[in-house]
Amino acid sequence: MLQRRIDDHAPPTREAMREAEEIFYTHLRRVGLKHTDQRDTILHTFLETRDHLSTDELFRLVRKKDAKVGFTTVYRTLKLLGECGLASMVPFPDGTTRFEHQFNRRSHHHMVCTECGASVEFFSPEVTKIEEDIGRKYRFDATRHNFQIYGLCEDCRKRSSRKPV
Amino acid sequence: MLQRRIDDHAPPTREAMREAEEIFYTHLRRVGLKHTDQRDTILHTFLETRDHLSTDELFRLVRKKDAKVGFTTVYRTLKLLGECGLASMVPFPDGTTRFEHQFNRRSHHHMVCTECGASVEFFSPEVTKIEEDIGRKYRFDATRHNFQIYGLCEDCRKRSSRKPV
DNA sequence: ATGAAATTGAAATTCATTTTCAATTATACG
DNA sequence: CGTATAATTGAAAATGAATTTCAATTTCAT
Ligand SMILES: [Mn+2]
Ligand SMILES: [Mn+2]
Ligand SMILES: [Zn+2]
Ligand SMILES: [Zn+2]
């Protein structure tokens, strides 16, 4: 799926990878879970891309490294990565659930084309401020939010005006 | 599910109901569909509450008026109501999909408690402005957005500090 | 090394949503 | 009015993503 990235840059350095592992394994210890090769492979595969992956797409990538890893384990690990803040879910307007890693990544939001699924990432500190303000106002301990913008990208707009419904 | 409402008020007047019907039937005509009793009943039931209803909850309410209406028809009609702007989907953090009517209703957003599911509605014109700004900046024809805040409500915060994990 | 507890992955299950299809109903036209 | 045509309906079946089950395997504290 086409994706234009704003703060695009290189894959994580070995240092960065260690740091992320540290976060993951600390979380595992905290909840009394074990360190396994499968979890390692999935973490690495996940951090190596900045794409928004479906569980199935991640599964296929993981399989290239270790053909014995099961689909279920990818699901379960993705959940663990979410718990320690390394992964977050991005719901797409076509109903698919995608994940992206949040390690060493500036917090951002997505604008998605409802026609072709192309997505743009954008930064909006105002959104974080609104979260804080509204949380304070209604006495919630606001921990996260969900913000996406949907619409037609430039290409699809052109296409649909050329060939009108 | 507990819900604190901000612009709470009376059920729609007969006039308002006619107006909403007008919108619905105009839409039906536009897409070449027919006017049926089931669709009428579902529209009325839906407009009579301001709750955020799951499809199943709406189905149960509709059944009270006409026990012969099928589940499938409720699904299908909800989709039609969405198409003409009378209904909108509110995704809850527990994964349930809920619907609320948008007729004569000020645009608003939701903050939801991840523990008990209680929700607060709030207004934030800034969010609409962000949608417009970002759309312009990246040349999208931005048509809608999705914004929810998740966190712990005051009650749940007290409860969890009393009985710590 | 040993054993208790967690993990794994294939298969089964769940569950919301969508599709199928034969019978029924709406509505346009003569 | 009928009548023809196309849409609608609802029960049942199908789909598909996500979760659960469970026996075999692996981790890790001792
Ligand atoms: Mn992103
Ligand atoms: Mn609402
Ligand atoms: Zn597009
Ligand atoms: Zn709560």
Image (cartoon, coloured by chain):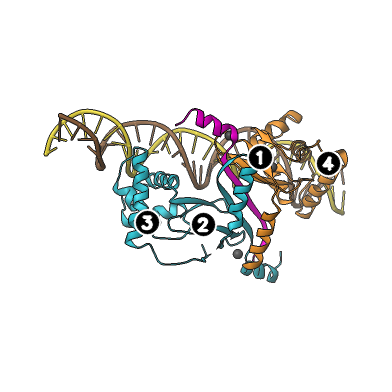
Chain colours: A orange, B cyan, C brown, D yellow
Residue A21 visible in rendering: yes
Front-lying residue, B9 or B162: B9
Disc 3 marks which amino acid?
Thr
Q: What SS does tag 2 mark?
A: loop
Please tell me which residue is depicted at 71% across the width and 31% down the height of the picture. A61
Q: Are marks 4 and 1 on the same chain?
A: yes
Disc 2 marks which amino acid?
Ser
Q: Are marks 1 and 2 on the same chain?
A: no
Disc nearest the viewer among 3 and 2: 2
Q: Which residues are magenta?
A: A140-165
Disc 1 marks which amino acid?
Val
Please tell me which residue is depicted at 71% across the width and 38% down the height of the picture. A5
Residue A105 vs B154, above or below: the answer is: above
Q: Tell me the residue that label 2 is attached to.
A: B107
Image disc number at residue A134: none
Please tell me which residue is depicted at 66% across the width and 54% down the height of the picture. A127
Give the left or right position of residue B10, taking residue B120 as reference.
left
Real-space Cα separation, disc 4 to disc 3, in angstroms: 54 Å
Q: How many marks?
A: 4
Disc nearest the viewer among 4 and 1: 1
Was residue B73 drawn as part of the magenta stretch in this picture? Answer: no
Front-lying residue, B15 or B55: B15
Real-space Cα separation, disc 4 to disc 1, in angstroms: 26 Å
Real-space Cα separation, disc 1 to disc 2, in angstroms: 25 Å
Give the left or right position of residue B133, taking residue A8 as reference.
left
Image disc number at residue A120: 1
Q: Are marks 1 and 2 in contact (CB under 8 Å)?
A: no
Q: What SS does tag 1 mark?
A: strand
